[in-house]
């Protein structure tokens, strides 16, 4: 009976060794939060939010998230392709 247990244990150890050596299996590591890579528009929006709020206030518009997002989208769409590339390259290098 003990020979069959030793044989089974040897078999399991061989399987574990094979799994650890293969690239298809990795040991679990600490849970790390997956962060989404920021793009140029998101960076632009975060940096220009106060300016968008100022423009809305100057036009007498009421504050709401949808109004702010619409203003930011309009501001983004008015940028030249070079200006967009500038924001995208800054975001890419973060």
Image (cartoon, rainbow, N blue to C red):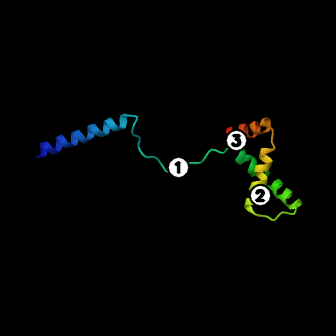
Classify residue 49 by image quadrant: bottom right
- Pick the residue in front: 12 or 52: 52
Give the number of the disc on residue 68. 2
Give the number of the disc on residue 48. none
- Give x and y (percent) for residue 89: 72, 37
Q: Mark 1 and mark 3: span between their CA atoms?
A: 21 Å
- Pick the residue in front: 15 or 43: 43
- Give x and y (percent) for residue 11: 22, 39
Residue at 39 percent across and 37 percent down: it is: 24
Circle 3 is placed at which residue position?
91
> In screen coordinates, is 91 left or right of 6?
right
Q: Mark 2 and mark 3: span between their CA atoms?
A: 21 Å
Q: Is residue 7 above or below residue 54?
A: above
Q: Is residue 7 above or below residue 69?
A: above
- Give x and y (percent) for residue 48: 79, 51
> In screen coordinates, is 22 left or right of 52?
left
> In screen coordinates, is 30 left or right of 84?
left
Residue at 59 percent across and 48 percent down: it is: 35
Circle 1 is placed at which residue position?
32
């Amino acid at each position: 009976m003990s020979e069959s247990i030793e044989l089974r244990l040897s078999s399991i150890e061989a399987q574990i060794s094979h799994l650890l050596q293969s690239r298809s299996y990795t040991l679990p590591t600490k849970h790390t939060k997956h962060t989404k890579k920021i793009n140029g528009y998101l960076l632009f929006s975060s940096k220009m939010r106060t300016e968008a709020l100022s423009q809305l206030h100057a036009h007498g518009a009421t504050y709401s998230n949808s109004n702010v997002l619409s203003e930011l989208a309009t501001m983004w769409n008015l940028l030249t392709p070079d200006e967009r590339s500038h924001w995208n390259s800054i975001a890419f290098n973060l």
